[in-house]
Image (cartoon, helix red, strand yellow):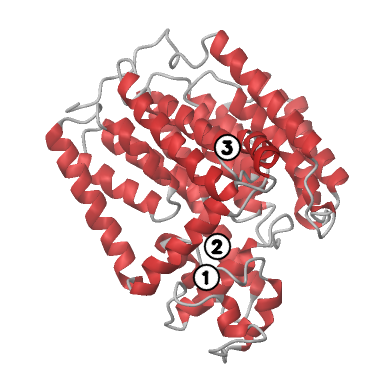
């Protein structure tokens, strides 16, 4: 390894160690400075030709730095543990809100002392769980292994996510080679600071989603439609967002393959949801999704502009109408993209899904930094730069946590999206989203 590369990786490791063990979320200046340093070194390392094997080893070691650390930038893991403790005790985590079990006016007081200790730490005690069955299985396993240890629970989840990231690395390399692209491009995802910090560090399950989506693509590119449907079911049962890929698959699958794919998707999804099935499951998840689209707002772009216009016209926040309307606009955009896509192949599916997810996040009412990890993953298969830039500048959204009031600085939000949209327009103008590396020809999918 070149001495300069080694020095850059050592400085990156120090930055990550400080982020993992020394910097609280409220210390925005320190947080932004360390992430900017890590991002700058990340770009320099890959621009100067860090070898693939050394990059893969560095990606692993930088993640292992976080292994015993409690998440410092997100408190979502308390809800993960709450749901996991319920499941490990044979209770349905979708059935009751936390305040119904441990709140001051709880109607069904929980006897478990761990739940009583956890309750004041929850950031959403008045909402039903929104985490699908694959997440719940992970939470339940970790809680069963470490029922009385918060750190043990966190380490168990982190090991699971590290295994998923290792599988993602293998799938990335296999797919890049299959599509005739340089395997070194995998490092743009595997060493990305947002990916390392938000997935490994803060325990967000976009890492598992990305693994399953790549598995689906790998299986479909090999002509295995039924297995691909099962892989997508696992992705959807981790986060619902991968359902957006469905319109993009219609022209890539012949009708017998569509049948096998759809049947496998439905069967596996049913099998995953059946253990939790009840009238409460459907009603409570519906309430949670309704709240997400009609009540929650954070780090949005187009929505904030329409919100301002709505307030000017009506005098109050129109999110109850704007949230669902923007979601429907995303769905319409997906159908339009699927219908107008030129020469759809498996090699171009990541680009198409990247564009669709970009539309979704530009129209969304809530965009947390870790939501962007799939964009970074998919951009590896293109020459586009905007997703990488977005992953670096999304740290600006953490300015909202400087006080307990969680007040956003809309000037910083405007700066974030101005930069992202400028780079996106540059990518479009220079043809970086027109297809994968045109100098190589990807191998055709079998049975497509």
> In the figure, 376 relative to 122: above or below?
above
Q: Residues within 10 Å of mark 1 (few under 14, many from 20)?
A: many
Residue 420 in view: yes
Mark number for residue 142?
Answer: 1
Tag 1 and tag 2, C-beta contact below 8 Å: yes
Q: What residue does disc 2 label? A: 157
Residue 106: x percent and y percent?
59, 86
Q: Residues within 10 Å of mark 3 (few under 14, many from 20)?
A: many
Q: Mark 3 or 1 closer to N-term? A: 1
> In the figure, 324 relative to 66: above or below?
above
Is 410 left or right of 155, judged from the image as shown? Answer: right
Tag 2 and tag 3, C-beta contact below 8 Å: no
> In the figure, 219 relative to 251: above or below?
below
Q: What residue does disc 3 label? A: 190
Is 180 left or right of 79, judged from the image as shown? Answer: left
Q: Nearer the viewer, residue 222 or 434?
A: 434
Mark 1 lies on a secondary structure that is helix
Q: Residue 443 falls in which quadrant of the image? A: top left
The alpha-carbon separation of the residues under discs 3 and 1 comes to: 25 Å
Residue shown at the point (73%, 28%) measured from the top left: 5
Residue shown at the point (72%, 31%) measured from the top left: 416
């Amino acid at each position: 390894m070149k001495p300069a590369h080694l020095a850059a990786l050592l400085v990156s490791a120090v930055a990550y160690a400080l982020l993992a063990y020394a910097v609280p979320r409220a210390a925005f200046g320190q947080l932004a400075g360390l992430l900017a340093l890590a991002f700058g070194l990340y770009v320099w390392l890959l621009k100067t030709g860090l070898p693939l094997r050394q990059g893969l080893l560095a990606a692993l070691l930088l993640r292992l730095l976080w292994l015993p650390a409690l998440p410092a930038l997100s408190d979502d893991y308390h809800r993960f543990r709450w749901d996991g403790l319920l499941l490990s005790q044979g209770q349905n985590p979708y059935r009751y809100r936390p305040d119904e079990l441990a709140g001051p006016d709880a109607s069904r007081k929980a006897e478990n002392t761990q739940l009583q200790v956890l309750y004041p730490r929850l950031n959403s005690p008045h909402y039903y769980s929104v985490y699908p069955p694959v997440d719940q299985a992970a939470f339940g396993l970790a809680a069963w292994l470490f029922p009385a240890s918060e750190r043990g629970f966190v380490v168990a989840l982190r090991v699971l996510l590290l295994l998923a990231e290792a599988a993602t690395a293998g799938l990335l390399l296999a797919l890049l080679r299959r599509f005739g692209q340089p395997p070194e491009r995998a490092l743009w995802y595997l060493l990305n600071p947002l990916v390392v910090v938000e997935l490994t560090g803060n325990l967000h399950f976009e890492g598992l989603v990305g693994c399953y989506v790549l598995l689906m693509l790998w299986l479909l590119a090999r002509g295995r439609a039924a297995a691909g449907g099962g892989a997508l079911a696992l992705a959807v049962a981790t986060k619902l967002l991968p359902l957006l890929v469905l319109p993009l698959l219609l022209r890539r699958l012949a009708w017998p393959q569509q049948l096998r794919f759809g049947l496998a998707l439905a069967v596996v999804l049913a099998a995953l949801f059946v253990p939790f099935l009840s009238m409460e499951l459907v009603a409570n998840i519906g309430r949670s999704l309704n709240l997400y689209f009609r009540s929650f707002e954070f780090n949005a772009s187009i929505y904030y502009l329409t919100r301002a216009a709505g307030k000017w016209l009506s005098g109050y926040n129109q999110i109850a109408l704007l949230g669902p309307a923007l979601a429907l606009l995303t769905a319409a955009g997906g159908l339009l993209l699927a219908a107008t896509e030129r020469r759809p192949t498996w090699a171009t599916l990541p680009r198409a899904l990247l564009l669709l997810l970009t539309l979704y996040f530009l129209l969304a009412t809530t965009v947390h930094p870790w939501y962007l990890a799939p964009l970074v993953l998919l951009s590896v298969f293109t020459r586009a730069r905007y997703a990488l830039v977005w992953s670096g500048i999304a740290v600006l959204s953490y300015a909202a946590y400087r006080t307990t009031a969680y007040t956003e600085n809309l000037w910083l939000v405007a700066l974030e999206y101005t930069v992202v949209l400028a780079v996106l327009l540059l990518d479009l103008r220079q043809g970086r989203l027109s297809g994968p590396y045109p100098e190589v020809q990807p191998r055709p999918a079998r049975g497509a």
